[in-house]
Image: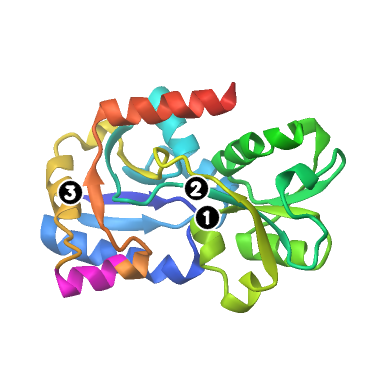
Amino acid sequence: MTLNMLVAPDFAPENFPGWYMLSTLLQGRSGLRLHLLMPSDAHEQVRMLADGGVDLVYANPFDATSLIRSEGYIPFARPAGHSDEMVIATAATSPLNCVEDLQPGCSIALTDNRDVKLIGLRLLEPADLAEQDIRWELANSYQAAARMTLNGQVDAGFFLASAYHSLARITRERLKVLVESKLRDISHVLLAHPRMTEDLPRLSEALLGVNPADPGDLEVLRALGLANGFEAMEQEDAEFMIDLMDTLLD
């Protein structure tokens, strides 16, 4: 039997090969067969999940909340020391220097990443801006959001912090950060479908055993952009994160 593992489409492009390296490693250590599903965007992810054949999901916190609550997915791991922060940035030449400089009617580029938007809206509260006060411009990637910001198509861009810091140095030098979140308790999550109960212990042991102190394992983790590896996540930890997401939605 082959297990389908879906990876959220919001990781940096240079980390793409890392997922295949991790899949190969996990298959060798767990004895389980894995097939990676790599949706190109949030809409394709929704379609894949709706098909009902996804056994494992590396999900952003917003989607993880829905999958745990509505579909009964089981949280079992998360990246160690790698929270999901977000950045609001503008062009280096922009007159904007802080979020308070953003005015009603401003334009912001963002990807279809709902947790980044939720956090970003909270960071905009000092500017007294609500969702309806902003002209939203959808970008198909964080690289595209950066181009839109640099080209003056928008006043600012919303970025997953890890994606922002993974942009090419020459791109980041032409941008400036208005604010970066420091939430620390919100992260991507590895989830298992309830039908995975029998195989989950083997897979979880293999994943949590990927050791940053081992040179071979560290190569895989660095390719993923997760050099600290993974740590176990209990249901209680997931519920705490879900409560934080509810707070962001309020």
Callout 2 environment at 10 Å: few (<14), some (14 to 19), or many (20+)?
many
**Residue 71 vs residue 113, the one in the foreground:** 113
Q: Which mark is residue 144?
A: none
The tag earlier along the polypeptide, 3 or 2, is 2
The tag earlier along the polypeptide, 2 or 1, is 2
- The residue depicted at 21 percent of the width and 50 percent of the height is 1
Location of residue 93 by image quarter? bottom right
- The residue depicted at 25 percent of the width and 33 percent of the height is 195
Q: Residue 239, how many percent across, how many down?
A: 35, 25
Q: Is residue 231 above or below residue 176?
A: above
Distance in Å between CA atoms under marks 2 and 1: 5 Å
Q: Secondary structure at mark 1?
A: helix
Q: Is residue 10 visible?
A: no
Q: Which residues are magenta?
A: 214-221
Callout 1 environment at 10 Å: few (<14), some (14 to 19), or many (20+)?
some
60 sits to left or right of 212: right
Amino acid bearing label 2: Glu
Q: Is residue 168 magenta?
A: no
Q: Which mark is residue 203?
A: 3
Q: Which mark is residue 85?
A: 2
Q: Is residue 250 above or below residue 178?
A: above
In the picture, the quarter occupied by the C terminus is top right
Q: Residue 249, how many percent across, how many down?
A: 58, 25
